[in-house]
Amino acid sequence: MASPIAVYSLPDLKNTTDDALPNYLTSLDFKQSHFLTDVRLAFGYSAVVIAAVTFGFDYKLGWDETKEYTYWAVIAYFLLNGVLTLWIWFAEKGKIFQGVTTNGTLLTIASSVTKHNPMYQLVVRWTDPATSEPFDWESREISAPFTMWFSSDGQFIAKPFQQWLSSEIPVIAAASMAGSSKKTGRESVRPELPDEMMQTTGPALNVKSRKGGK
């Protein structure tokens, strides 16, 4: 069981719920895309590399030899950090999940909280290949109190959270029903022994029983 969190800390409540949402969706029929995160990491690591290389050259060669290169490196560093900030604000926009199902349904979910308001807010966008044009997005804004899936001592309870998502978002409900049907189908399949095996198994068991009784 996961460690409990502080129930009065909105960032902790939000971060724990944000982590649980992709785990649930990937357990269904959704394959998560990490494109936004990969781009953010690329910008961040590039800025770190520029800073590290500049420091190394300055330490080894001295300021007089590297000041011209340092000038351009500083400009590049701040440009990369500026682009990174714009990427987080305008591209990611609080997105915690981007994914697609095997039938081509695209799903994007962004989360947010308002200060002093313990409500988990989601902006959900999805496409339905069966009824809409490509990239013709449907959207919905939903919210619920964190107390719906957190206990009084700060334990996250997955079941009510998953039920809330399924009840509010049609594509998640469809994926959940499909997953339940597959699971039920697997459980209903019971292996049957051939007649020849049944005939040989019966006497063998009887022999073992008689030996045990001696």
Image (tube, rainbow, N blue to C red):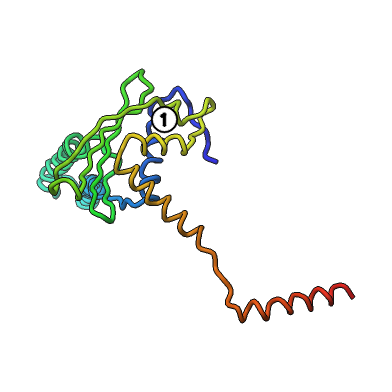
Q: Quadrant of the C terminus?
A: bottom right
Quarter-of-image position of residue 168: top left
Element under disc 1: helix
Query: Where residue 41 sits: x, y (%)?
Result: 26, 47
Residue under the image location 17 percent in, 41 percent down: 137
Residue under the image location 87 percent in, 72 percent down: 213
Query: Where residue 201 sits: x, y (%)?
Result: 68, 77
Q: Quadrant of the N terminus?
A: top right
Q: Type of residue at label 1?
A: Leu
* Nearest to the observer: residue 28 or residue 188: 188
Left or right: residue 136 compared with residue 165: left
Residue under the image location 36 percent in, 24 percent down: 119
Q: Looking at the image, can residue 64 be seen?
A: no
Query: Where residue 42 sits: x, y (%)?
Result: 22, 49
Q: Looking at the image, can residue 7 be seen?
A: yes
Q: Is residue 66 above or below residue 18?
A: below
* Nearest to the observer: residue 54 or residue 95: 95
Quarter-of-image position of residue 160: top left
Query: Where residue 33 sits: x, y (%)?
Result: 27, 50
Q: Which residue is mark 1?
A: 13
